[in-house]
């Protein structure tokens, strides 16, 4: 997205765009697990490469969305009091991690690695899900810590105004 078109979007619209990108990335990971199970022999090269392509695109979307969500949450451009927004972004990224880990919980991860003796499409999807969970969890932890710091800073903001008023300012 160019800078010119990004400037035309408001902060909320840009956030919703990133949320859609994160959702599309998680949906792509779900799709990669389904693609890996389509063929009779999941170790075929074309199926593994197709799954790897879907995983790579999905991880790029998830990584980009998480980066922009974290950066926008810490930005002073749109809000003075950021703790609630940081907390909301943290919850959103934890939800993204939960959705990305669910294919691993539904299907047994790395179940065919030892049966085939080589990496199959299912293992590529499992690795992609693990990487997506890591990306979302790191982003969620960073925004959670930022929310804690912002809440601590915002809790006593009125004191600085009270002191200025009594000094004659």
Image: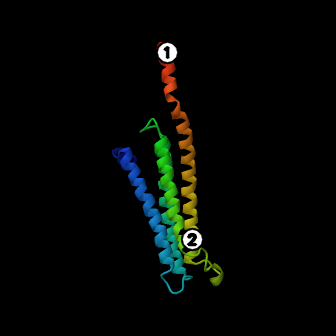
Q: Residue placed at 54% from the left, 82% from the top? A: 42
Q: Nearer the viewer, residue 120 or 163?
A: 163
The disc label shown at residue 138, or none: none
Say whether residue 138 is visible: yes
> Mark 2 or mark 1, which is nearer to you?
1
Of the pair 7 and 144, the residue shown nearer to us: 144
Q: Secondary structure at mark 2?
A: helix
Q: Is the image coloured rainbow, by chain, by secondary structure, or in one colour?
A: rainbow
Nearest the eye: 102 or 66: 102
Task: Give the residue furthest to the bottom.
Answer: 40
User: In the figure, is residue 111 to the left or right of 4?
Assistant: right
Judging by the rendered image, the residue that carries numbered circle 1 is: 166
Q: Dots 2 and 1: beta carbons under 8 Å?
A: no
Residue 87 in the image, given as x and y percentages of width and height: 50, 47
Q: Is residue 1 visible?
A: no
- Near mark 1 (Cα within 10 A), the count class, few <14, some 14-19 or many ≥20, is few
> Of helix, strand and loop, which one carries label 1?
helix
Image coordinates of residue 63 in percent, x first then y, are 51, 57
Q: Is residue 58 above or below residue 141?
A: below
Work out whether residue 55 or residue 165 is closer to the camera in this orientation and state it.
165
What residue sits 45% from the left and 35% below the top? 80
**Identity of the residue drawn at 50% across and 70% down:** 53
Residue 141 in the image: x percent, y percent?
Answer: 57, 50
CA neighbours of label 2 inside 10 A, class few (<14), some (14 to 19), many (20+): many
Is residue 167 shown above or below 134? above
User: What is the CA distance from the residue labelled 2 to the residue labelled 1?
Assistant: 61 Å
Q: For the point 61% across and 75% down, which residue is it?
A: 110
Residue wearing tag 2:
126
Determine the residue located farthest toward the top in the rendered image.
168
Sequence-earlier tag: 2 or 1 = 2
At which x and y percent is residue 136?
A: 54, 57
Which image quadrant for residue 137?
bottom right
């Amino acid at each position: 997205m160019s800078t010119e078109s990004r400037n035309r979007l408001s902060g909320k619209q840009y956030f919703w765009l990133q949320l859609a990108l994160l959702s599309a990335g998680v949906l792509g990971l779900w799709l990669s697990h389904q693609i890996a199970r389509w063929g009779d022999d999941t170790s075929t090269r074309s199926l593994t490469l197709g799954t790897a392509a879907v995983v790579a695109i999905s991880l790029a979307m998830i990584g980009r969305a998480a980066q922009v969500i974290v950066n926008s949450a810490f930005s002073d451009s749109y809000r003075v009091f950021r703790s609630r927004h940081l907390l909301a972004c943290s919850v959103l990224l934890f939800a993204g991690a939960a959705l990305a880990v669910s294919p691993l919980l539904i299907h047994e991860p790395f179940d065919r690695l030892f049966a085939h003796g080589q990496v199959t499409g299912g293992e590529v999807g499992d690795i992609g899900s693990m990487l997506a969970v890591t990306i979302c969890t790191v982003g969620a932890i960073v925004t959670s810590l930022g929310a804690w710091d912002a809440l601590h800073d915002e809790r006593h903001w009125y004191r600085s105004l009270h002191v200025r008023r009594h000094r004659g300012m």
